[in-house]
Image (tube, rainbow, N blue to C red):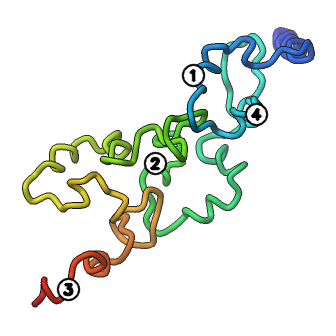
Amino acid sequence: VGFFIMVACSSDVLAAGKTCYDCHKKAKAGFAKPFVHQPVSKEDCESCHKRHGFSNKLVLKAKGAELCYSCHKGLKEKIEKKTMHDPVRKGECTACHDPHASDRKELLKETPDKSLVCFTCHPALKPVMKAAAAHQPFAKGECSSCHPAHSTDEARLLTKPGSDLCFSCHDKDKIIG
């Protein structure tokens, strides 16, 4: 009986013209950022969340990346490659992307500049960045110049195979001689 009351209350609240933000005012204020996920900007919470009535428990319509793929058609096929970044392989889009709103393009939680988004999960690399012999793109925080964020067909999440990647920036004749 309790479940039916909750569903009836949830339906009555929405039928009475109330929106999710009538109760979740703080959430709405937190989403006032330059880059807003389309369902959030349209106040279409139910594209991702199930109604929860008075249970006070947000429930997603699908788990992990499957929720993202339900709208981002073709993305799964595009990023399923031989080598996948660990959060991508695990379906953890929200490890790097905010599902609601962000101050950064692509709803990134941190800026890709200076590799802050990378250091969220790879903090041990930050001190290496300042080493005297650090590779210059890495020292500048340009991880994506060699490593794509999601996936690749190359080993070690590289943009190109081995020496092809190196020689795309370095003059082969000067190095090999």
**Distance between the alpha carbons at the discs numbered 3 and 2:** 35 Å
Q: Is residue 46 above or below residue 22?
A: below
- Picture quadrant where residue 136 is located: bottom left
Q: CB under 8 Å between callouts 3 and 2?
A: no
Q: Which residue is mark 1?
A: 30
The numbered mark, 3 or 2, whose residue comes first in the sequence reads 2
Residue 36 placement (x, y as % from top left):
62, 36
- Judged by depth in the image, the label closer to the viewer, 2 or 4, is 4
Under circle 1, the secondary element is: helix
Under circle 3, the secondary element is: helix
Q: Residue at x 22, y 77 (%)?
A: 170
**Distance between the alpha carbons at the discs numbered 4 and 3:** 52 Å
Q: Is residue 111 above or below residue 59?
A: below
The numbered mark, 2 or 4, whose residue comes first in the sequence reads 4
Most foreground residue, 101 or 74? 101
Q: Is residue 38 above or below residue 137?
A: above
Most foreground residue, 76 or 28? 28
**Mark 1: amino acid:** Gly
**Distance between the alpha carbons at the discs numbered 3 and 1:** 50 Å
**Mark 3: amino acid:** Lys
Most foreground residue, 100 or 61? 100
**Mark 2: amino acid:** Pro
Image mark for residue 177 = none
- Judged by depth in the image, the label closer to the viewer, 3 or 2, is 3
- In which quadrant will I find the N terminus? top right
- In which quadrant will I find the C terminus? bottom left
Residue 35 placement (x, y as % from top left):
58, 38
**Distance between the alpha carbons at the discs numbered 1 and 2:** 25 Å
Image mark for residue 87 = 2
Residue 83 placement (x, y as % from top left):
43, 65
- Picture quadrant where residue 146 is located: bottom left
